[in-house]
Image (spheres, rainbow, N blue to C red):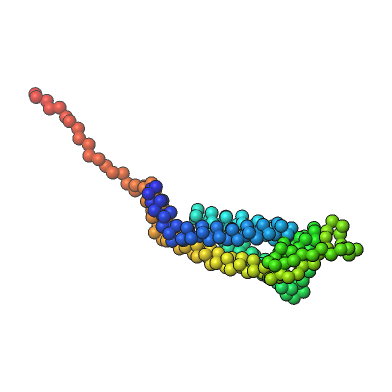
Amino acid sequence: MESNRRKDKGDWESKTNVPQAKQSVNRDTVCVLERQIFDFLGYQWAPILANFVHIIIVILGLFGTIQYRPRYITGYAVWLVLWVTWNVFVICFYLEAGDLSKETDLILTFNISMHRSWWMENGPGCTVTSVTPAPDWAPEDHRYITVSGCFLEYQYIEVAHSSLQIVLALAGFIYACYVVKCITEEEDSFDFIGGFDSYGYQGPQKTSHLQLQPMYMQIPLDNN
């Protein structure tokens, strides 16, 4: 029984390519953590929350793949759809598609602070110059600056981050659908073969009639 389980687990890992899935999850997690760090530096609370939820669900998706849990994998696939939608919104936001404007960054900070993307001041080649005196409308605890000389504007860096996440999410969604398909085929094969009989399990058997055994008796002989 134990050897059959080990064999089935090995077949499952080879069929779903679990080592490759682990590498993909590690790559995805590293990319999200890198993005999370810069979102923390820029006090972008909405992206921080989204990144945190994404990391948790990616880990649960890997757990579902290893432990043969289709509900975890299905939930992971559903979340990837929402994750792609969120990143598309971020791209449209920074590219000012439609009525969106990157000047209203308070959307990403939940209107808690006036901070913007960390890359706005720290992008490649950017030069930050403080403006004095600050305008009357500027808060006292904030400095008023101008940014110039950037090789790449901060909105394009944010767009590149979101685009990378969309590519990784699409790859993860395809893999999740493949794993769910494999699980469905395994369950159908399991039911067709005969349930637990395919794994070496045999239930108690009932007899429809009694088996009669012959009985022998020794009768003493009378010499008279």
Of 223 and 205, nearer the camera is 205
| Residue at image location 54% in from the left, 54% down from the top | 63
Q: Can you say which quadrant of the picture contains the C terminus?
A: top left
- Please count the marks in the image: 0
- Image coordinates of residue 110 in percent, x first then y, are 77, 60
**Outermost top residue:** 224
Residue 42 showing in the rendered view: yes
Q: Residue at x 34, y 47 (%)?
A: 207
Query: Taking 87 as reference, is 7 above or below it?
Result: above
On the image, the x and y values in percent for residue 88 come to 67, 70
- Residues 210 and 222: in front is 210
Q: Position of residue 67 (x, y in %)?
A: 50, 53
Residue 81 as seen in the image, left or right of residue 122: left
The answer to whether residue 81 of the structure is visible from this angle is no
- Is residue 8 placed above or below 85 in the rendered structure? above
Which of the 4 image quarters holds residue 145? bottom right
Q: Is residue 99 above or below residue 185?
A: below
On screen, residue 199 above or below 124: above
Q: Residue at x 66, y 58 (%)?
A: 36
Q: Is residue 204 left or right of residue 180?
A: left
The residue nearer to you, when weighing 92 against 222, is 92
Spot the residue most to the left.
224
Figure quadrant of residue 116: bottom right
Q: Residue furthest bottom?
A: 98
Residue 216, image x, y percentages: 20, 35
